[in-house]
Every structure is written in C-alpha cells, then in structure tokens.
Amino acid sequence: MLPSIETLHFALKMTVRDYELDRFGVINNAVYQNYLEHTRHMFLESNGVRMIDLAERGFSPVITKAEIEYRSSLQSRTDFVVNLELASLTKVKFVFMQEVRSLPEDELIISARITGTILNSSGRPCFPESF
C-alpha cells in the first residue's frame, strides 16, 4: 500500500549546469521540462511515493497536457527554485501548478500547468487507493 499525499506545496532549489546550455548559450525548453519533472518526482518522494514502487505495482504516471509559458531565461550557473503546488487530484487526473524562479532575484522564468493521470497495467486511468 502506498502512503497518501499530505503536502500540497513543494520547492526544490537547483543550479543551471553548463552542459544544459545549447549552442546559442540558452537553456532549451526541454531542459526546463526536465526541471519540472524532477521536481514532481522529488515532491512525490517527499510524500513517500517512489516512482519505482508505482512501476512495481503496475502503475505508470503519464503527462496528458503541459501548458508552459516562458517569460525569461536562466543563465549558466544561475541558482533557481522550482515551486510546485498540487492544484487538483481526482480519481482520474492530477494537476500541478509549477514555476521556475531565479535566485536571489525571484524573477519568474516560466510558469506551467501540468495535467496527468496514472495508468494501470491495462492502460486505463486508475489511481492507487492510498494516492
């Protein structure tokens, strides 16, 4: 049995690594999506839900919609924070509101609304009971 999610907010501090820059010296949009995904995984782990445990029980979390607004760009070696809020959790879907902010300036870099579900081994939306 999986633990239930009790915390609705989470923040994860990171630093831009040089290899994350593209040949134009900026961070590609896919890297920002990696930041968002990593933060979601760390949020789940902080609530006792590990991705490996979901997989072993036949559950597959999937993103069904990603709405991302890019407002600015981070630079090499910039410190930043990814904030997360679990905005909605129903029997068939979840919605995360996320944002990336530079540190210490607190400038909004991107904002995102990420919608997803968890599929069972038959490929149907099905959340674990304790989720």
Image (tube, helix red, strand yellow):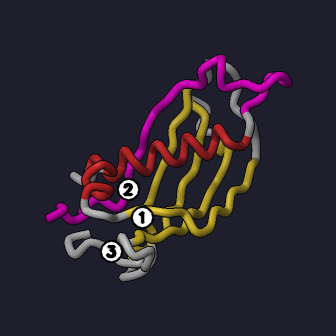
Tell me whether circle 1 and circle 2 mark residues in contact (CB < 8 Å): yes
Of marks 1 and 3, which one's residue comes earlier in the chain? Answer: 1
Q: Secondary structure at mark 1?
A: strand
Image quadrant assignment for residue 118: bottom left
Q: Which residue is mark 1?
A: 86
Q: Residue at x 35, y 77 (%)?
A: 126
Horizontal side of residue 7 vs 114, given as left or right: left
Q: Which residue is mark 2?
A: 9
- Rendered location of residue 119, percent (x, y): 41, 71
Q: Which residue is mark 3?
A: 127
Q: Which-is-in-front pick, marks 3 and 2? A: 3
Please state which amino acid type lies under the numbered disc 2: His
Magenta residue check for 116:
no
Quadrant location, the N terminus: bottom left
Residue placed furthest toward the right: 24
Q: Residue at x 72, y 32 (%)?
A: 27
- Rendered location of residue 55, percent (x, y): 32, 56
Q: For marks 1 and 2, give the CA distance.
A: 7 Å
